[in-house]
Image (cartoon, rainbow, N blue to C red):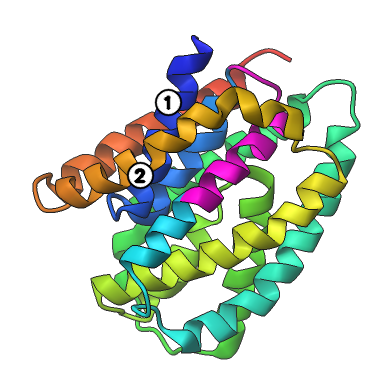
Amino acid sequence: MNTVVVVALVSLSIGLSKGGLGGPMLVPLVTPLLSQIMTAPQAVGVSLPLLIVGDLFALRLYWRKWDMQHIKLLVPMAILGVVVGTAVLAFLATRPDDTILRRIIGIFTLSVVIYRLIRARLVQVQYQPHHWHGYLAGIFAGIGSTLANAGAPPFTAYMLMQNPSPESFIGTASLFFAIVNMAKLPGVLAIRVLDLQQLPGIAWSVLLVPVGVGLGRWLTVRVSPQVFEWSMVGLLLCASAVLLLSPS
């Protein structure tokens, strides 16, 4: 697949997500896409600067729309999850091939699909909130985000059970993942998963992130959320199948 096309699609996807279209559920598509043109560790590393740029726009759009109670509950354990995920990523990045990491990314990507299929049932559950639910969601979101940019399922499952308003959900997601992505940066630099020499080659794609943000804001009121979500589920299912079934 053409490198320019893939990087452009990734940047637009990040922008669409940060603009509110699909929320954090669109981001797990980023790493599988990039892993088609580079190694899995490189895909994890290269995507991070683009995500951080997207976070800046998301924070501007949803400034102070977040729920600090949930942020305070989720973030500490998410940071621990980032530490654990970075240690695993460091080990996998030293292996002679990236097959294991590609399989892990495939599993996390598939988890997004499974979550979408059972989400309606989760909302119907008679739920009693407990702090440890936030701790559990936080640590798994941190691990998933570090290994595959797929922290959305545990975060989203937890938040939906709290019955937030759409604005509060997106605002909380914007701040949470901005913090998590910044927490990931020292680790990916330390273990050299993110090669700074690669950045000049994709610097042009940063300009597509705000384009995607604006497009996402425009499409949120014009595209059926159900149609968009199921389209993304189909793409994520295909991506997970490629990662899980392709020969080593």
Residue 107 lies, in percent from the top left, at 60, 40
Q: Is residue 40 magenta?
A: yes
Tell which of 223 and 209 is nearer to you: 209
Q: Quadrant of residue 24?
A: bottom left
Q: Quadrant of residue 165?
A: bottom left
Check disc 1 and report the residue beneath it: 8
Range covered by the magenta-colored residues: 37-53
- For residue 161, the mark is none
Residue 205 lies, in percent from the top left, at 47, 30
Residue density around tag 1, few if under 14, some if 14–19, many if 20 or more, within 10 Å: some
Task: State which quarter of the image contains the C terminus.
Answer: top right
Residue density around tag 2, few if under 14, some if 14–19, many if 20 or more, within 10 Å: many
Tell which of 7 and 149 is nearer to you: 7
Q: What amino acid type is highlighted by mark number 1? A: Ala
194 to the left or right of 209: right
Check disc 2 and report its element: helix, strand or loop: helix
Which residue occupies 61% across, 22% down? 201
